[in-house]
Amino acid sequence: MKLAHNPLLAELLPAWRARAMLIIMMVLFGGLFVRAFWLQAIDNEFYQRKGEERFSKVLPTPASRGRVLDRNEQVLAMSTQVSAIVAEARPSRTEAKAKANPRDIGAEKLSAAQIRQLADLLDMDHREVARKIPEQRGRGYLKRQVAPDVAERILALKLPGIRAEPEYRRYYPHGEVSAHVVGFTGMDDKGLEGIELAMNRPLTGQEGSRRVITDARRNVVEDVETLKPPRDGGDVRLSIDTRLQFLAHSRLKQAVAEHKARAGSAVVLDSRTGEVLALANWPTYNPNNRAQLSGPPLRNRAFTDTYEPGSTIKPFVAAMALDAGRYSFETPVDCTGKLHFGRYAIGDAHPHGVLSVAEVIQKSSNVGVAKIAAQFTPEEMWRVYDQLGFGSPLKLGFPGEAAGRLRNPAGWKPVEQATMSYGHGMSVTLMQMARAYMVLARDGDLIPLSLTRVDTPPINGLQVFSAQTAREVRRMLELAAGPGGTAPKAQIPGYRVAGKTGTAHKLEGGTYANKYIASFVGFAPVSDPRYIVAVMIDEPSNGMHYGGQVAAPVFSDIMNATLRATGVAPDAAMPPLQMARVSVPVKGVP
Amino acid sequence: MLRLHVVLIMLLLASAISLVSAQHRSRSLHTQLEREHQRMRMLETEWGQLQIEQGTLAAHARISDLAETKLKMHAPARNQVIVLDSPEAVQ
């Protein structure tokens, strides 16, 4: 063979070349082995993760928002699970199908009949439904807050791309009655008003998440780990008593209609614990109806609207006078004529003669109370008003709480001090006024208010007046609500009540208009005061505007209902209505 | 020696099969657990709805409205109230 004669072939290759090749190949194989080992045992995370992504999923674990309860565990607000119906554009399953029908690229379309069926279940127009289904990609809500049974029927249709996502909807069983206290939440279950906003944090639940392994049919086959345990929101138990809330609400509503008033508020406090038992405002709104959640009805007037309190402030001036020891219950005060301050004159609607301090309060004499106030420096008076809480917000955490206006005493002129003694030239909220009366209903001390249930009430609060003073002013206020006072209509058969009327002109653009705010603040039973009721009617315009005519009857009814509903024993002789000393069954009595 | 091998192989097989069956059981139990969880959530939802329903039906506004319109009830006027004096009568 020719080849055999090739001298090159005849030459033997050097042995090292074969060995070198062998070594190179072994090194390369070794490299592969090392790499394989590296991926398999040491740096295995990346592919492991990639693999898991194919079959593992992170699912959210829903957590619900806490309930809002009244003091007796009645539900005032509660979330329940509903569904959001979502339409998702779905890529077609097969390319072939897409080729067969070029218009079908991108999404599996629902037929017109299917859309109509869907629209019927959703109670929507079918054109709207068709418009809301995304064409190519992405997703959109068809309808939110759908009831669970409706959602189930929709899912049963098994329409491609139509899913239900869990979400919560909040219900308020008592509707407008407790709307201002409870407030409401937004679409995303976050508090926007009232307690829902003030207590948003404790109420909010925390959604958890877990990692699961799913099979081809997307059934969960294994819980791998809980990434975050869900935490349901806590319940909030309010101090509100739904029964009293309803009584206050309906009586206030009636009074506002009867007197053709613009608005009104009523507050019921427990003077022993500082709890707010009822808080009603008119106008109000229905928190279940999202369409009308705006405008003036949302205002929680008892907290956010300030007004000039008028005569309801007078008892505090009397208390200040008694407390300083400069006056007693019987000290005479000359209330004849008018009190002149430069070009201003202060007078009484009905002129009085010489009155005792008690009578000044009973008959609500402006002249008398201004004369008493004149015996004190502006600083002394300011300190009392400030301690009573006027001019500073209550800090209950309620949205939009107003502070009211109480000016610095350094700038008070004598006439201003005089007007402030009968509640003009300063402004307060109804809630502040009701709380200030706690000083008189209790033995001269003031405890903080609470909108949540109080199980261990504070024993001693801030002492503003002595207990003796508080007792004497209580007697004055009982006279004011008695036959010779300004508000005999505040009386309740069977109970001793005490309270003070207020009739204040409204300030409009800096001048006093011929519009009024009629108010009444009082407490009962006088022998051992338990409840404080404050009522304010804004612009009564049906012929009557005095606090004694407009607000006192409302006070009387709310207080009466409160005392009876809570079973407080009568402390006055029941005026004989029809007495019966009988042992025969009482039947057929008209 | 051979017998030992056979025994070991049998043991290995048994263990492998029991592993598979254990895995299967664990999965089906888990699916069941999932189903029960779902049922729990559904019952919770239902309970919530019932609470709301009860609250709505028992709302004072509704009760007083029904009492006045349907049952024609009203609070007694003062002259309709009789105070019973003797303690025996109050039973």
Image: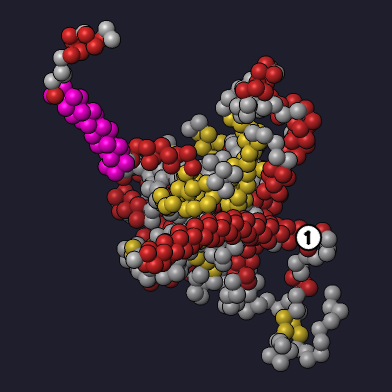
Q: Which residue is mark 1?
A: B66
Quadrant where the C terminus of chain A sits is bottom right
Q: Quadrant of residue A160?
A: top right
The residue at 68%/57% (across/down) is: B53
The answer to whether residue A68 of the structure is visible from this angle is no
Percent from the top left, x then y, of residue A408?
32, 43
Subunit bearing disc 1: B
Q: Position of residue A15 (x, y in %)?
A: 14, 24
Q: Is residue A21 magenta?
A: yes
* Pick the front one: B70 or A515: B70
Residue at 39%, 40% (x, y): give it: A49
* Residue furthest front as drawn: A1
Examine the rendered structure and indicate whether residue A300 appears above or below residue A459.
above
> Dot 1: few (<14), some (14–19), or many (≥20) neighbours within 10 Å?
few
| A406 versus A125 height, above or below | below
Q: Quadrant of residue A513?
A: top right
Residue A215 shown left or right of residue A395 in the figure: right
Colour approach in the figure: secondary structure
Quadrant showing the N terminus of chain A: top left
A461 above or below A501?
below
Q: Position of residue A174 (x, y in %)?
A: 64, 55
> Chief secondary structure of the magenta span?
helix
Q: Tell me what residue is drawn at x 83 percent, y 64 percent.
A: B71
Magenta part of the chain: A16-43
Disc 1 residue type (three-letter)? Leu
